[in-house]
Image: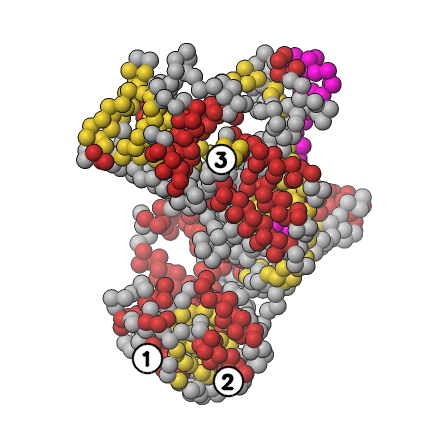
Amino acid sequence: MEEARVGVYVCHCGGNISDVVDVEKVTAYAARLEGVTVARHYPFMCSNPGQALIEDDIGAGRVNRVVVASCSPRLHENTFRKALARAGLNPYLFEHANVREQCSWAHGSEPERATEKAGALIRMAVAKARLLEPMECLRLPVVPAALVIGGGAAGLRASLDLAERGFAVHLIEETPFLGGRLAQLYRVYPTDEEALALLGDLLGRVVRHPRVRMYTGTTVQAVEGVVGNWSVRLVQRPRCVSEACTSCGRCAEACPVTVPDAFNYGLGTRKAIYLPYPEAHPPRHAVDLEACTRCGACTSACPEGAVRLEEPAREFELQAGAIVIATGFTPYEPARGEYGYGLHPNVITLPQLVRLFSPHGPTGGSLRLGNREIRNVVVISCVGSRQAPCNGEKANTYCSRYCCSAALAAELELKRRLPRTNVYHLYRDIRTYARNAETLYERAGVSGVLFLRYAAGEPPVVVPEGDTLLVRVRDQLTFGEEIEIPADLVVLATGMVPGPGVADLAAKMKLPVGEDGFLLEVHPKLRPVEMPVDGVFVAGTAQGPKDLTETTCSASAAAAKAAILLSRAEVERDPLLARVDATRCTGCGVCLPECDYGALRLLDAERRVVVEEAMCKGCGSCAAVCPEGALAVRGYTTEQLAAMVEAAVAGEGEGDYAPAIDRERHAGQAGAGAAGTVAGG
Amino acid sequence: MGTTEKIREIAAGLLRDGKVDVVIGYGPGTLPLRSTPLFARTVEEAERLIWDATCGNNLAVYLPGRKDRVGIVVKGCDSRAVVQLIHENQIAREQVFVIGVPCAGIIDRRQVEAAVEREIRAAREEGAELVVEGDGWSRRFNREEVLYGACRTCRHNNPVLYDALAGEPLPPRDGGPTLVEIWEKKPAGERRDFILSEMARCIRCYACRNACPMCYCTECFVDSSTPRWLGRATDAGENLFFQIGRVLHLAGRCVACGACSRACPMDIKLGLLLGKMNKDVLELFGHEAGLNPEEPPALNAFRPDDPETFLLGK
């Protein structure tokens, strides 16, 4: 191999580094390290002129290994690798020394020692850089199909966009019916359109699309593979109703099992064999096997012979190049006793009120409570959102974004239907930020809704009083007046919490979630719909509270991002993966159980292990346990790391941070004193 | 029928029926108190197999990486090496026919030689006694008293794995304190001085490594040049680094057969170092090598509820 000529480039980061670390001193030190031919410093190495410094040195043949001492490699490793490639040098002949996050930022109060540490970090990086080897990217073919997880508004939108773009789409939905939370809404703000009409339009287009295949009652068991080549194991629960079903409903009439109706948020009941609402899709009943007693009444009642209670679950596998996660949210369920919830039947949540509006709801759209007319309704905002953490318990500190507008829209609907009913809205702040949603606030006020503002630390108190309720609130708009409202109905505008499957899916796919439990994208502004696992995208409220407009936007964005990936013939992967030294491997197999990705295979006949590079993530677990030292991760070999350790301890105990130890040790070797040009910024 | 005859019968049968390609056992040595490994490939060769109290070699050292079918004569400790090698995938269980021998202990030749201080011409066992003879002299030893130290406190004198047993199982020994237990009680300074003086004598011939059935790495760390872990000099420090490195590489894998000690031309008490490590592995991880093939390797298994007392410095 050609002798290593290392160029060291120290970045000021516009003062982020140079205000603490003496960059000139560090650069001069670096120039004296063995193998270093060029050392420079510059205000912003990542800027175009900064990168040009490197490219010029490479072009002139002054350097063939590059060390940049700047920020975290997470930020700019790729930037500099590309600069190397542009200059015709293999991009993997680059080593990043992090002298910002791991030095200047951390040791701002001790500039001298920080300077010493920066020198040590560079010394280590140079020691490794001298042993770097050129590598080539792996190229893997892309499966031109997408898996969309979740059949609600976001999943349907993303599926349709991807299918329209020409890709095969596998859409899986955990429940037996498509439509998600959108199917449970009545009208959506700010246009007041019927939710079922919007859903019907979207669903119809998805259902009719030849490139979309739908799997209801289906959940993810395991995800293997890498970007472009996902292999997903799925399990489909039995629906127990075949396509012969005409949804005539005789089965449900015959079914003797009655359970609370989850579709109506527990208001009312349904049977163990059910269709949640007449237009539900697929238009077939489904059996709730947890409630079903297998009595067989439905089987005999069905004129089409469509009910088969013994249908087995089906396990199957799908290949996809991209995965879109659209698993949605769950409405916050207030604790028992929170604003009287669960203690009095007339304390309900906003999603429950919306079900009461619906003609398919538990009351057929009638707004009566028992036999009484509703005279006074109190709506309380920010229930389950913007909570203050107390006693170390987990709190939903975030704003759920949809509830203000949705509550106002519901109040307008109440006023429209029951003009004489008094509506009181108890709020902390009104956040009708969506386009045209502010008019809801104005219209609610005009229509007579009374607004009372409570302080965060002093929420309203709901007290059951016989048949009715009493709500006490200290109203800030009247400068702290204590107001008591006798209420027939209290509506809690509950926020959004992560769906029950998010944590499980995140664990299976190794995806990060935020403190709020929602999936965390790579960057909220730069890459808002991409997950840190390449080839996985997030759509809709799996990522956090969104209203329908935002959900649709993010779903289309995720589909567009997935399409960019799927339209490529192949993906490139970093080759920083496990490698087996076949001459050392004895085939003991100790590494096999350590690999979480199934990337290692034991060739029994040859008694050695091979790496399936498409599966390997380069985590290094195998290299850590290999008793023979036969496994290593390329770019992080034992030899390279040992050189770094040696360089790290080489400077220990030296009074001056700039030890001449390397030079003494290798005295007489060519190049030791050939410190190159030292250019100022 | 004596053990020797029994071994010959089993071996001849295996070779005659074509069940194995070779039987690895012991043959008579050219010097008294010695035996030598014997590879019998024919029924005739099997007639030269022997068994006596000099059959110390752990023949499992010949197993790693074999492609043929092997019959192998093993003592209790050797059988643990076979189990461990199967566990480490160095030989398949189906490849090996294990001829187990209950072992009453192996004679420490060096002890006898040191006691007589003369050239021994012949030696034989007579009941509980060992008779050694030279030119015009003879001396009797209580056999038990000239066994290897590890044999005297052996807890696995019967094979833990065998396909045929040559002889009747022996009752377990009552043990008594092991050499390690005695040594452990000495003051730290004394132990350190002892180890350093032992290490100063090591000539780094690597006979210990080559005799060990578990030292089968294709490239030993002492031979590695990139990175070079070990200097070439044979001072006490480098020697200690080699021996400690070897001991740690055998953590949870050493079957305490004593092959390293027997192979050492300088008579260094390697068994103490390895014995101490085995004791620590047993106490810390509840793991003994070569007893349970299902058990994961002690140092590769992590339990989230590991108390990790060493982190707290207790």
Q: Is residue B139 visible?
A: no
Say how many tags the image has: 3
Q: Which residue is mark 3?
A: A192
First reached walking from the N terminus: tag 3 or tag 2 = 2
Of all chains, the one bearing label 1 is: A
Q: Amino acid at mark 2?
A: Arg
In magenta, the rendered stretch is: A295-322
Q: Residues within 10 Å of mark 1 (few under 14, many from 20)?
A: some
Residue at point 46%, 27% (across, down): A354
Residue at point 67%, 19% (across, down): A248
Disc on res. A483: none
In the picture, residue A516 is in which quadrant? top left
Instruction: Please tell me which residue lies in front, A80 or B214.
Output: A80
CA distance for labels 3 and 2: 68 Å
Are circles 3 and 1 on residues that touch, CB within 8 Å? no
Q: Which residue is mark 2?
A: A62
Q: Residues within 10 Å of mark 3 (few under 14, many from 20)?
A: few
Instruction: Please tell me which residue lies in front, A200 or B89.
Output: A200
Q: Which residue is mark 1?
A: A25
- The location of residue B21, given as percent across then percent down, is 76, 51
Which element carries disc 2, helix, strand or loop? loop
Residue at point 35%, 60% (across, down): B192
